[in-house]
Amino acid sequence: MNIHLYLFLKLKGSMRVRDLNKVELVKQKAMELLVRIGFEGFTMNKLAKECEISVATLYIYYKDKDDLILQIAKEEAERMSNVMLEDFDPEVSFEVGLKQQWKNRAKCMLENKITSQFLEQLRTSTYQEEVYGTIVSNFKITLGKFMHNAIKKGEINDMQLEVYWSVAFAPLYNLVRFHFDGSSIGGRPFVLTDKVLWDTFELVLKALKK
């Protein structure tokens, strides 16, 4: 290979790595800033300052603030939903499937604190419908199939999806929220342990199973 061509390709490759690193930096700093100050206070200028880059650099990757938030939200929602479906089979028994879901969700949220807080914040924003209406469709289909199989097999009663989710998963999300805050009701210090997690799961299982 011509030495000049070799050097050009090597330089191009290293530039590509740096670009990818910069995109990841922007994504992480954007989520941290959004969690800290909210969607209304977030601006491209503030993000550029957090990343220690020029605002012009941000516009290489994103059209505007909304485009940046939506791209990051869709990428992270898809990544998190894929993690939550790892080793999950909608055809297994209700107890086995629900336990796998708790295991996946707890691990996913605890290992991705900023992303979890960012996506939770997203649920009460104007971006919710566009993000969750498309990206997590496979996730919803898989979990819907699991729920309907459990009803068909007579393992749980038929109920509204909102009721099912509130009983099946809201306790887990509250425990994780308390853990992130470091305190629970009344400011009591709180750390989520395996014992607390699985003791709560057993209560949820009893509430749902026939």
Image (cartoon, rainbow, N blue to C red):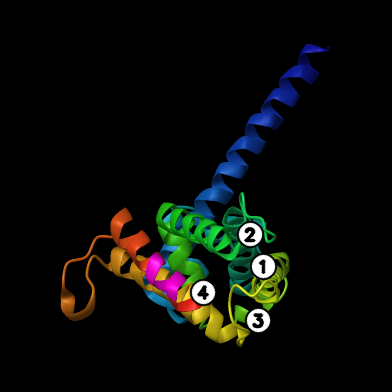
Helix, strand or loop at mark 2: helix
Task: Report if the CB atoms under discs 2 and 1 are less than 8 Å apart.
Answer: no
Residue 95: x and y in percent read 53, 63
Q: Viewer-proximal residue, 184 or 163? A: 163
Between marks 4 and 2, how big is the CA–CA gap? 35 Å
Residue 42, can we see it?
A: no
Q: Residue at x 37, y 60 (%)?
A: 198
Query: Where does residue 152 sit, x and y in percent of width and height?
Result: 71, 75
Q: Position of residue 130 (x, y in %)?
A: 68, 77
Residue at mark 3 = 129
Region in magenta: 202-206
Mark 1 neighbour class, 10 Å CA radius: few under 14, some 14 to 19, many 20 or more: many
Using a 10 Å C-alpha cutoff, classify the residue at mark 4 as few (fewer than 14 neighbours), some (14 to 19) or many (20 or more): some
Judging from the image, what secondary structure is the residue with disc 1 in?
A: helix
Quote the CA–CA distance across marks 3 and 4: 32 Å
Circle 4 residue: 209
Query: What residue is shown with label 1?
Result: 146
Q: Name the residue carrying label 2.
A: 75
Closer mark to the observer between disc 3 and disc 1 = 1
Residue 48 is left or right of residue 151, and the answer is left
Question: Between marks 3 and 2, how big is the CA–CA gap?
Answer: 15 Å
Q: Earlier in the sequence, mark 1 or mark 4?
A: 1
Whether 21 is drawn above or below 108: the answer is: above
Q: Main secondary structure of the magenta part?
A: helix
State the separation of the CA atoms marked 3 and 1.
24 Å
Marks 1 and 4: CB-CB under 8 Å?
Answer: no
Report whether residue 28 is seen. yes
Q: Which of these two is toward me, 72 or 94?
A: 94
Name the quarter where the N terminus is drawn: top right
Report whether 13 appears left or right of 22.
Answer: right
